[in-house]
Structure formats: structure tokens, C-alpha cells
Amino acid sequence: MFRKIIASVVIASQLTAVTFSGVGYGNTKDELKKNALSDLSQNISTTVHSNFTSISNVLNDKYDEKIVNIVELKSSLPIKSAHFSMDTESLTASITTKNSLAGYLVELERLQKLIDSNTKNLSSIKDDAILYETLTKLLVYIDDFNSHKIVATMLGGVNLPSINLNSLEVEKQLQGLETKVNSLKAAAKILTNKITQENIYIIPIKNNGTSEVTQFAKVFKTKLMQKLDATDTPNEADYVLRGSYEILKDEIFVSLKLLDDSNKIVNSANIMLDKKAYSKYSYKPKSKNLDDVVNSDSVANGDLSVQLSFQGYPRANGIDLNDGDKFLLYGESNKDICYFLQGSTISKNKNYSYLMERKNGRFTSYIKGDKVKQAVPLFEDALQVGEPFGSEKITLFAQTLQDGKCNIKRPACKTDAKTNLCLVVNSKNKKLTTSQGISQTRSLFSQFHKKNTSTRKVQTAEDTISFTTFR
């Protein structure tokens, strides 16, 4: 049995009590630990999203913007010095300022020294093979450093170590040393030849941190699966393979990293693809503007925390689904809430935002009572993938109850005859794009709370799950 319960979060102020915890269920000790760590990781990632602006402000100017992207953070934040406590049927994993921050500081100092020493040696290296190996190590060290610094910041760390190098600078040097590979099959073989681990879930690679799975990334994932002992979902996996790609003039630079269940990087590899290897596939994402809007802001107000997930996909990063696939959508909250779901779809010729209708014809619903602090299905039946196919998001906008009542403000929508969806519209009844729809909803939340002083004690939150559908 596995049931995922939303992790608790207590954030006071810097250098005071900060606790992140996650609860896991399972039939064996290994299952309990893996599920507890997965829940803890998801909880930290959700909190980072809600507090992203404040976190970014305390990071140094050289902080890698590609790592900063919220999409990249969803499945890569490391768990260090976790404490485990066993209940009758569950295991709780937690990290705290008191017990865990010191471990992150030690690791940051270690990585800072490694980055500094390897950087100083670069100018004296004459052998390309040694230079390539050193640059590859630096990429891993920088990624590790940035990820640890984010968690340390969330735990209240101040005056943290800093580095004067980012991964973009290292990648540019690596790109000049790479030999181009002209087929995806050959690239997959080269990238995986040193990976001996089993039970690996492969997250499709993304371009510059966007959430969209392009056709190229989908095909490349298939090639990688043929070379590895791969699983269909993250819940079945002991390791996760994630990565990114950068589009250059006539080639694509791919970087992959293999992570364990604590999000520690255990292997990495890079490769340069010749245009011949990918030219017949679409490789430029269409959803970057929407990703920027989703990641740039949030309606978070107070310590209300909500999460969305697909059954079997606790790490909501790069889910790719095919025509006819069915999935169960789950929501979690740490308090009684009312909420609505807003969908966003970008396909070849379509770009719109819509409200997801409940079975009773209403758009708002509740998570309250004994449903709080556990994953609950948001629809009675599984949702099925169908047209239009493309980059999609579902956002849960939530608000705590006031005197047991719901006064959440949702956007207006108008039923579209072709799609049978209630498309989000503005005050002039004009259909809005995905980015406009999300921005308008956030604006409604802000305006409502400014005008209604009685709602100041009402807390709000949001969470978004991203996925791409294919025919």
C-alpha cells in the first residue's frame, strides 16, 4: 500500500525553527524510505516555488539562471542529514535548521573548494581530454552547489558560501571540445555507457528549463530507455535521469545527470548533436512564455500549502502522455480549502486557458475535514488524454475558508462549442491566451484581498503540474 500525505512546513524567520517533513507508506523499509524522501523532496520544491523571489534575492549574482528555473528545481533539490521516525504504518523523513543546516553548510564549503581549485587549474591544462574531464566535473560541482544553496537558504542559512562561475560558462567551453554525433541512437549509447544502475526513471530533457516535452525530447527518451533498465513511472524507480539541452546554431548540446533517491548526482554525461540527428523532429518549445509567467509569481499568502500530482508521478517534472492514456489527478492541502482548477493548453494552432468543470457542473470544490493532509482524487474518474495535443498545465488555485464558507474569486469563462471547455475570458468576453489567463486569475486574487479587509486572514496558495501530450 502506498498513500502520499502532504508534508508539513514550518517557516518562521531566518536562523529560527524551520522544518520540512514528508510521510511515506510502503510494505518494506526501502519503500517507506523512498516514499518518505520523495514526499519530502516534493514539499521542499513546492515551498521554493512559493518563496522563489525572496530566495533569488539572497543568491549571488553568479547564480546560474538555468538552475534557478522552477521547472529544473522540481526534482533536483538534495536531501541531506534527514531524520527518520517510524509510526505504526508510516515513516516520516524531516530536515530541520537545527539538525540539517550544518550538513548543507559543510557540503557547500567542500564544493566551493572543489570549484575554486578546478577553476584555477583550467588555464594550465593543455591536454583536451583532461580539460574535458575537468569541465565535466565542474558542471556537476556547480549543479550540486546551487542545489544545496537553495535548500540551505530555505533552512534559514545566511552569509552562505558563493562561487564566481556558473554552468553556462562551463558549458560554452565544453561545447568547443565536443565531437558531433549524427544520430540519436549513437548519442544514447555514448551517454549511457557508464551507467550501470538499474530501475531508472527517465525525465525527458528540456530546453532551457521549460516544462514542455518536445518531439525531439520524446524520441530521445525512447532511445535512452532502450539502453537502460528503465521504469515507466518515478514511483517504481530507484534513480532518476534528468537533463537539459541548449539549441546552438547548427547543433544541440545535451547534458544529463543521474540522481539517487536523495537527489544526489551519481553520474553525468554531455554530448553535442549534429543537426542531422534531430532535424526531422520539432525541438523548439512553444510554451516558454507560459513557463515564465507561471514561475515568476504566485498567489501564495500565509502558510497554506497545496500540491497537485498524477498517480505514480510525485515528481511533476516532464510528464509525457500519449493519446488514450488515463491518469488520476490528486490534490493535497495542509488546511481546509476551497479551490478551482485552471487548465492551459498550447498546441500547434491553439493557445487558451480554461476552467475544469466538476461532475456537478460547478467549478469550485473543497478539501476539508479528514481529507486534509492527504492526497485525494480531484475527479471521481480518471482523465483521458485526447485532442488537442501539446504542452499543457493544470493549476490549482486555493483559498482557506472563512467561517466555514468559501469566498474564492475565480475568473469568468465561456463555453466553447468546438472544445466543450469553459474558456477563460476577460471583462469584454474575449478569450484569453494561457499566459493572459494565469495572469488575470492572480490579479483577481490580489484585487479581491485589497478591497476586502475582512479577508485579510484568508490564506491563498497555488500549485501547477506540467505535462505534454502526444498523438
Image (spheres, rainbow, N blue to C red):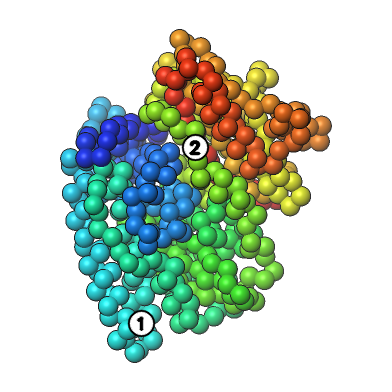
Q: Please tell me whether mark 2 or mark 1 is closer to you in this view.
A: 2
- Which residue shows up at 62% across the image and 34% down it? 440
Left or right side of 81 for 260: right
Q: What residue type is labelled 2?
A: Ser
Gap in Å between the C-alphas at discs 2 and 1? 42 Å
* Image-quadrant location for residue 274: bottom right
The residue that disc 1 covers is 131
In the rendered image of this protein, does residue 466 appear above or below residue 258? above
Q: Alpha-carbon neighbours of circle 1 within 10 Å: few (<14), some, or many (≥20)?
A: some
- The image's mark for residue 431 is none
Q: Position of residue 202 (x, y in %)?
A: 48, 56
Left or right side of 20 for 381: right
Q: How many labels does the image show?
A: 2
In the rendered image of this protein, does residue 194 appear above or below residue 460? below
Q: Where is residue 421 in the image (x, y as percent from the top left)?
A: 73, 32
Q: Which residue lies furthest to the top in this view?
A: 403
Q: Is residue 276 in view? A: yes
Quadrant location, the N terminus? top left
- Which residue shows up at 58% across the image and 22% down it? 409
Q: Position of residue 353 (x, y in %)?
A: 67, 37
- Of 16 and 181, the residue lying toward us: 16
In the rendered image of this protein, does residue 442 appear above or below residue 225? above
- Which residue shows up at 39% across the image and 49% down it? 56
For marks 2 and 1 on the same chain, the one whose residue lies earlier in the sequence: 1
Q: Residue furthest bottom?
A: 126
- Of 161 and 199, the residue lying toward us: 161
The residue that disc 2 covers is 298
Q: Where is residue 22 in the image (x, y as percent from the top left)?
A: 32, 36
Left or right side of 470 for 230: left
Q: What residue type is labelled 1?
A: Leu
